[in-house]
């Protein structure tokens, strides 16, 4: 028996999530309403080669990693901001952080 977030989808039922850096680099992830925020984050991190610290919802609220996408109202067309973990550039007091944008499109295309 497969885990709920790994169930096979019928053609046309799949929904894509795009995680994009402000630089333009992006990756495609799978959207399922019974998938957790943490699972989405874990899929995006290696694809973007960075550590995601937080996901921020459209109303600028931090999303709970243990909740399902649908529970957090992450539906196709929703844009989330992903805050990457800070890293040190030079010396112990200089750090940088960046954010990425998460876009969900029910047709598997980037939302405008």
Image (tube, rainbow, N blue to C red):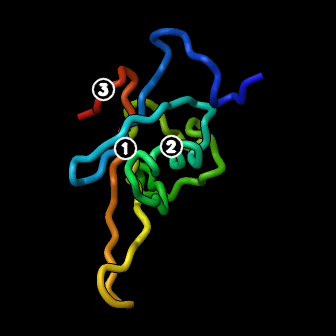
Q: Which residue is drawn at 36% across and 24% down?
A: 108
Q: Which residue is drawn at 30% across and 26% down?
A: 109
| 83 relative to 34, above or below | below
Q: Which mark is residue 19?
A: 1
Dot 2 lies on which element?
A: helix
Q: Residue at x 56, y 46 (%)?
A: 37
| 46 relative to 74, above or below | below
Residue named by callout 3: 109
Q: How far apart are marks 1 and 2 (CA)?
A: 10 Å
Q: Residue 66 carries which label?
A: none
The front one of 40 and 59 is 40
Dot 3 lies on which element?
A: loop
Residue named by callout 2: 43
User: In which quadrant will I find the N terminus?
Assistant: top right
Q: Which residue is drawn at 41% across and 58% down?
A: 50
Q: How many numbered discs sit on the rendered protein?
A: 3
């Amino acid at each position: 028996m497969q885990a709920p977030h790994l169930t096979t989808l019928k053609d046309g039922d799949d929904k894509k999530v795009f995680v994009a850096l402000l630089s333009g680099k992006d990756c495609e992830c799978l959207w399922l309403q019974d998938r957790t925020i943490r699972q989405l984050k874990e899929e995006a991190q290696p694809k973007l080669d960075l550590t995601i610290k937080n996901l921020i919802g459209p109303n600028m609220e931090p999303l709970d990693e243990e909740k399902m996408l649908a529970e957090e109202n992450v539906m196709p067309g929703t844009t989330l901001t992903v805050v990457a973990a800070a890293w040190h550039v030079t010396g112990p007091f200089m750090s940088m952080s960046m954010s990425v944008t998460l876009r969900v499109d029910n047709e598997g295309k980037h939302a405008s």
